[in-house]
Image (cartoon, rainbow, N blue to C red):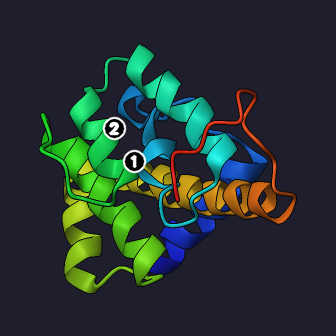
Amino acid sequence: MRTICAAWTFLIFVFPSSSTPPRLGCCDDRLNPPYKAEFEWWAHSRMAAEAGVAEDVIQAIRTETEPEFSTVEAAAVYHVAHALNHRHRLSDDEFAQARGTLGEQGLVDVIGLCGYYALVSLTLNAYEVPTPDDSAAFE
């Protein structure tokens, strides 16, 4: 089954899914902290706040502290992103639990977004892209 999900994860970059759940819209904020890309955090933390993500959740993610979640779906997205960013894989139990919570397409979308935002963060860091106001969220 993981092979099928891997194929779907690749395909979301070729044929973006119109069924991406709205709850994944701010997923990128859950993915950036390990890379500490200042510009990405500057832009997306603002988007998360505008989308209604609580400030304490945003700050917990910035400091890599597990936040309190309002839904099981948000917790699942966080745990998948955390596992992939820190261990670079999901255990069988994590994979099954995430698929059960997010559905197959939701899990594919989260995994694809993790890869995409790793690419974005690493690129921004390599070129040391500054924030427009020269602020720094990470030290």
Q: Position of residue 16 (x, y in %)?
A: 68, 40
Q: Split into 4 quadrants, where in the image is the N terminus?
A: bottom left
How many residues crowd mark 1 within 10 Å: few (<14), some (14–19), many (20+)? Answer: many
Q: Nearer the viewer, mark 1 or mark 2?
A: 2
Numbered marks: total: 2
Q: Amino acid at mark 2?
A: Ile
Res. 23 in view: yes
Residue that appears at 61% across and 68% down: 7
What label sits on residue 27 in the rendered view?
none
Q: Position of residue 60 (x, y in %)?
A: 27, 48
- Relative to 73, 133 lies left or right: right
In-front residue for pair 114/20: 114
Residue to which mark 1 is pinned: 106
Residue that appears at 59% across and 35% down: 42
Residue that appears at 75% across and 61% down: 125
Residue to which mark 2 is pinned: 58
Helix, strand or loop at mark 2: helix
Is residue 87 placed above or below 32 in the rendered structure? below
- Relative to 18, 48 lies left or right: left
